[in-house]
Image (cartoon, helix red, strand yellow):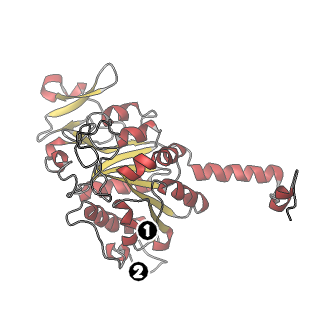
Amino acid sequence: MTENGGTQLSAKDFASDQEVRWCPGCGDYAILAAVQKFMPELGLPRERIVFISGIGCAARFPYYMQTYGMHSIHGRAPAIATGLALSRPDLSVWVVTGDGDALSIGGNHLIHALRRNVNVKILLFNNQIYGLTKGQYSPTSPLGTVNKTTPMGSLDWPFNPVALALGAEATFVARSIDTDRAHLTEVLRRAAKHPGTAFVEIYQNCNVYNDGAFDTVREQKENRIQLEHGKPIRFGAEDERGVRLLPDASAEIVDVAEVGEDALLVHDEQAPTPSLASALARLSHTPHGPTPLGVFRDVERPVYDRLMDEQLARAREDQGEGDLAGLLAAGDTWTIG
């Protein structure tokens, strides 16, 4: 919690001198405050923390963090973060992206970072809309969304970011919400400790172009299915509802009084395969009813940068130090001019 062995850092130490410029009431403000408050827990000097973003409203994030950072290319933040994490394993590398940035032009970069298990933490702000470019439908907009680009309603079936991450074999997958700072902070804490790629979807309200998209979950706590490892999944005002697994491996919501607690699914975030987590992810494709929040999956797998270092070490043992000049001059060469 100290910088270079000096004074203890606080949230203010992670706030830059740049004016924060999002629309008044935007959920990004709450997420920024939560991240700045959490950063001292890393116990790292600010020069060893990096935030990388793509393009979109969320992409302003690096300007407001008093750390190193880069406002990079649309959809390519995971690729740039991968290069940095591999070359500088001493850094804590964070990607901030939106549903449009990450799941449209950046879709391939996201899934490959997840499957490789690169040591980066990816925060995906999901507001189900393109906000920066003034309200077009995004890859997570619900079917039938009516706006400027789809005046008769979107025909596209939306992505489920958590299900997508689980399908890419991500080793850490979680979901939180912008207005619940305590829950979001705990999820960030878990993500930071995870060796490898950590993927966190954050429901984030765009009060200008998609206001109230998550009100069912934000304002009605009885619709939050809080996932706790090793515990039967129950929720509701008095924990009167629960989740059970069906024979086809899908999950359904039930009344505990009708089925009994023994019938409920016990959450196992450490299950070796993502099957149970995937069933939970599909309980609410869009958050208009009971929606799981928390850590869906947290498993260990070799981290990409460590595998690469081991491979390079073996190569040096077998072949010695490489000769770049000799390699470039090997084989057929031509002299021009």
Kindly tell me whether residue 270 is visible in this rendering. Answer: no
- Locate the C terminus and report the quarter of the image it occupies: bottom right
Q: Is residue 76 left or right of residue 231?
A: right
- The residue lying at 32 percent from left, 37 percent from top is 156
Determine which residue is flagged by label 1: 43
Q: Is residue 46 left or right of residue 148?
A: right
Q: Which mark is residue 7?
A: 2
Going by the numbered disc 1, the residue's amino acid type is Gly
Q: Position of residue 322 (x, y in %)?
A: 80, 57
Q: Position of residue 24 (x, y in %)?
A: 20, 66
Q: Secondary structure at mark 1?
A: loop
Going by the numbered disc 2, the residue's amino acid type is Thr
Q: Is residue 212 above or below residue 236?
A: below
Q: Position of residue 240 (x, y in %)?
A: 13, 34
- The residue lying at 34 percent from left, 68 percent from top is 36
Q: Position of residue 78 (x, y in %)?
A: 49, 54
Q: Secondary structure at mark 2?
A: loop
